[in-house]
Image (cartoon, rainbow, N blue to C red):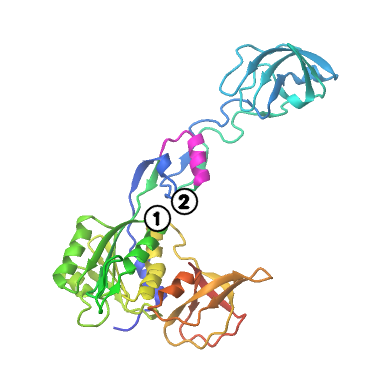
Amino acid sequence: MSLMKVEDALSQLLENAAQIGTENIPLHDALGRVLAQDLTANRDQPPFDSSAMDGYAVKAANLANIPVRLQVVGEVPAGHRFPDRLSNREAVRIFTGAPVPEGADAILIQENTERDGAFLTALEGVTTGQYIRPAGLDFKKNDVLIVKGTLLEPAHLALAASMNHPEILVLRRPKVAILATGDELVLPGETPSDNQIIASNNFGVAALAKVVGADVLDLGIARDDKQAIASKIKQAQDAKVDILVSSGGVSVGEHDLVQDVLKEMGMDLAFWRIAMRPGKPLMAGKLGDCQVLGLPGNPVSAMVCAILFMQPLIRKMLGDSIPQRIERAILGDALAENDKRQSYLRATLSIDDSGKSVATPFAGQDSAMMAGLARASCLIIRPPHAKAANKGDPCDFIRL
């Protein structure tokens, strides 16, 4: 089987992205969720003419000739309303956010008054409407204020609350099962033998899924045994996950069993082996309604493939119209000519004195070196057969 181009593999994967259902959730739980329908206001905001300042509600015409003496006939704090209509040469003490009394058409701020018991002296005039927020100034009932597909941030939740929505309809989080395979793996905290290593892919790949909005089911480690692998896959099926992501067992060795087991269980293979570095053994398919991604076992390869394929798949399921964002920078160091595979180089991202983004690749790019990936802030994209590039030349990158 020839190696597939990265862009062709990603396009095919995203074309098969499942439509995610919806659910009503409490507003308190909606941070980071994707809105499933336009959100309209249930009321005007503010619902009444309100005072924008602490001071006195007055009739502007009464303050045409300053100074003028007014009788203070009451007080209205926020959350209360003055019961009577304001008459000429009267004032009502008012506080920020309180409803403006009937008959009043301006607010005289308290700094421009002198109070003497039940009377005050206005020291400056006011204009009609001064320091009054009219009803519906912020928004009106039935206004569409948050549109379908919005990733909800703190300000959206505050707005939804002011629109009087205790619950909202959001897209369900895609459910992703994560499975590591290999006799050589033990979990952190366990004691490895001389021939074993600590499993890291479950943790890194799960975090990459969560950070773009998925719920994760960690299936742990399956040994290099068909029955053990099949049992773990059955757990994912029983949990009705949307995506199954395995790491390891998808290359060409005798103990690389994952693809064989999945095929025996009914998986339709979409593609296997991609013209990329790291991550050539990447596999994808579909098992019933579940999307399947088989990542390489090497830690950096697994993480890079998860960034390039799993994360865009999750974003697409959540309605993102641009599931993978490629940006432009200049190189902070020279690069040699590339071979026939598209390369993704770990790099740091900085800003130079002119404001340009600078991507500086690491010297070591081995697919088993996790420390470098943890220090990286982007992946430089080197197309197949790219010519040697000098420091300062343009490059494409994906932000980490």
Q: How many marks?
A: 2
Question: Which x, y percent locates residue 266?
Answer: 18, 67
Q: Is residue 129 above or below residue 212?
A: above
Q: Amino acid at mark 1?
A: Gly
Question: Which x, y percent locates residue 171?
Answer: 37, 49
> Of helix, strand and loop, which mostly describes the magenta segment?
helix
Q: Is residue 98 above or below residue 371?
A: above
- Residue 35 appears left or right of 143: left
Residue 239 placement: quadrant: bottom left
Q: Nearer the viewer, residue 27 or 129?
A: 27
Task: Tell me the distance, in whole angstroms, between the alpha carbons under discs 2 and 1.
Answer: 10 Å
Q: Which residues are magenta?
A: 154-167
- Residue under numbered circle 1: 213
* Residue in view at x 62 percent, y 18 percent: 76
Q: Amino acid at mark 2?
A: Leu
- Circle 1 packing at 10 Å, graded few (<14), some (14-19), many (20+), is many
Task: Confirm whether residue 11 shows in the render.
Answer: no
Residue 129 placement: quadrant: top right
Q: Nearer the viewer, residue 345 or 171?
A: 345
- Residue 215 appears left or right of 231: right
- Residue 374 appears left or right of 109: left
- Residue under numbered circle 2: 151
- Residue 211 appears left or right of 185: right
